[in-house]
Amino acid sequence: MLLAVTFALGANFPPLEIYTLDDRRVQLPADIGDKRVALLVEWSRQQDDDLRQWTSYLLRFKKEFWSLPLVGNLGSVFDAAVLVSLRASLDADREVRTAPLFKEPPDLKPLLGSDAQNVDVYVVSGDGKIHHHEVGPFADDKAARLVAAIK
């Protein structure tokens, strides 16, 4: 697992054009600007609890983040159902910071150095540079490192 963390650091987060749950078009990481923001990639819905713990911590410390759940490309009827389900499960603070990925961008896992077995949390700047990377379930020591990297 250390190999995945080492690989991602200093790499660039690939550009994504996505829509938030409140229907805003976002270009990440370009729209981040000159600050550092946490980007949380949830590879499967089984990681929902982990993602919720990470986002709760970031909200508590008023740190900006984007949640990127990979929900699959199931077709328009199923995609709509997934959106309804996601919206119903999130409070307003999380909804405006959530942009589901209906199709995994090509080579996203290898580019980010992820095995996709856990939530990946990246600290990224607008130029795409990955400044910090945490993997897996929430833990206080991981969260402290994450917040320090966001500044």
Image: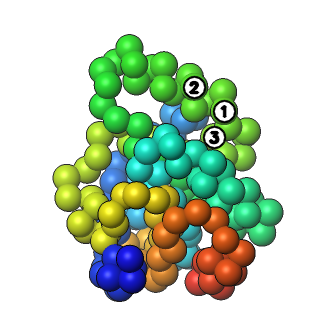
Query: Which residue is at 30% across, 31% downward?
Result: 73
Front position in the image: 51 or 101? 51
With respect to residue 83, does 97 lie above or below? below
Q: On the rendered structure, is 12 left or right of 107?
A: right
User: Marks 2 and 3, how far apart in space?
Assistant: 12 Å
> Looking at the image, do the residues carrying marks 1 and 2 touch, with CB atoms under 8 Å apart?
yes
Q: Earlier in the sequence, mark 2 or mark 3?
A: 2
Packing grade of label 2 (10 A; few <14, some 14-19, many >=20) is few
Q: Secondary structure at mark 1?
A: helix
Q: Secondary structure at mark 3?
A: helix
* Residue type indicated by callout 1: Ser
With respect to residue 95, does 15 lie above or below? below
Query: Which residue is at 33% across, 54% downward?
Result: 16
Q: Nearer the viewer's eye, disc 1 or disc 3?
A: 1
* Residue type indicated by callout 2: Ser
Front position in the image: 46 or 72? 46
Query: Which residue is at 72% across, 46% downward?
Result: 93
Q: Position of residue 57 (x, y in %)?
A: 73, 63
Give the labeled residue for mark 1.
Answer: 89
Q: On the rendered structure, is 124 left or right of 36?
A: left
* Residue type indicated by callout 3: Glu
Q: Secondary structure at mark 2?
A: helix
Give the labeled residue for mark 2.
Answer: 85
Point out the residue furthest to the left here.
106
Q: Earlier in the sequence, mark 1 or mark 3?
A: 1
Q: On the rendered structure, is 118 left or right of 147?
A: left
Give the labeled residue for mark 3.
Answer: 95
Q: Classify the position of the C terminus by image quarter.
A: bottom right
Q: Position of residue 6 (x, y in %)?
A: 35, 85
